[in-house]
Image (cartoon, helix red, strand yellow):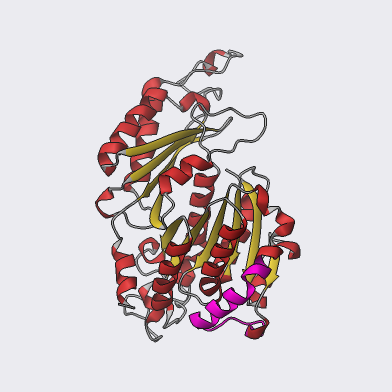
Amino acid sequence: MRLHVIGLGGAGGRIADRLAAAHDADPFLAGVNAFDTDMDALGALDALGEERRYRFGDAAGGDGLEGDLHAGRRLGDAHASELGRAMDDQQPSLAEAFLIVVGLGGAAGAGAAPALAEELSRLYDAPVYAFGFLPVPAETEAPDDDGPTGGPRERESPPTPHRPLAERNAARTLGALSDRCAAVFPFDNAAWLRPGETLAGARDRLDEAAVERIAALFGAGETPDGTETPQQVLDASDVARAVGSDGEIAAIGHATQAVEPPDSGSRFGLGLFGSDEPAEVDTSAAVSAIETVIRKATRGKSTVEVPDGRADRTLLVVGGPPAWLNREAIADGRRWLAEETESDAILSGDAPVRDGDAVSAVVIRSGIDEPERVRELRETIA
């Protein structure tokens, strides 16, 4: 699908910038913008030129809002139309979906996100999705000299920023986005931290994981000219059916496994004999690779916890070199996924990658039970 990404606030801006750096030339990325009240945060972006960065909210004085979500909401209400106009150079009317990326525990981005979602829904017929980073519990704790395990903080592990209102901001913003967006994709920072690791120390790795999953999902149905055509084409309507339109929480699972291209002289093919025709892939190797990535994408770490693995609706996309995309294995994987998720609605597609060196799977689950971390956040305002 043709996706327009809007990064709001510091976290959202970083993700928008990383997406532009890695995927600006890819057909799925129809437009990218970064909006913030913080001049320094915008200035730190590398891949987005000034024409795609925009500071709003003169009342903030060029700085952040120091956690004041109510101030962020006021700025969002006052500037939503202005932000919509700031996107015009990116031709948003051509987009098949919009994705607002935001740190849910902040103030500027989190405060403006609901108003911008409402404005985009008013202007365009395309669905508006939100991808939001959940704060870690340590952000609300008073800073001290101890590391996350109670011992002296290691020099190479920067301290977690102190944001006492982050969890309450996240709970309120989640509710507001659920009311205004077709679906919300939370990214649980806490679940992705390694033992002894701080949020600041893990930021690059977590941001990269988020970008990888956004691109894997929304880029699956778009292939450059001259490449293989999918047998089961994934389009914007498939994603819309999978995640719904009622603001439900959806989770993205993703996995890859390196494989040898069939024309590389692999022991699985005819490349050893110098044939000019593409070598075939050993069926058992293809079946094993596809089964592995589907199970890893389903049972591995998703963007947010999926309680008991179940979901009302599930979307499966398998990608990789065409010769490795064994149709029977994908069909078996789809049946296994239906049993695993207890889902009556399984949608699927494939994403062939000519000259690719890996098989991949993306599993989207929507209509899931409330994750524990989301429940913990909601209880802070109960």
Quarter of the picture containing the N terminus is top right
- In terms of depth relative to the viewer, which is nearer, 229 or 23? 229
Magenta stretch: includes residue 323: no
Vertical side of 119 occupied by 355: above or below: above
* Residue 67 seen by the camera: no
Check the image and report above or below for 206 versus 106: above
Q: Position of residue 170 (x, y in %)?
A: 42, 72
Magenta portion: prevailing SS class? helix
Residue 356, image x, y percentages: 55, 33
| 316 left or right, relative to 53 | left
- Name the residue furthest front: 122
Residue located 28% across and 49% down the image:
309
Is 275 on the left-hand or right-hand side of 341? right
Residue occupying image coordinates x 54% and y 78%:
72
Which x, y percent locates residue 261? 53, 28
| Numbered range of the magenta stretch | 60-83
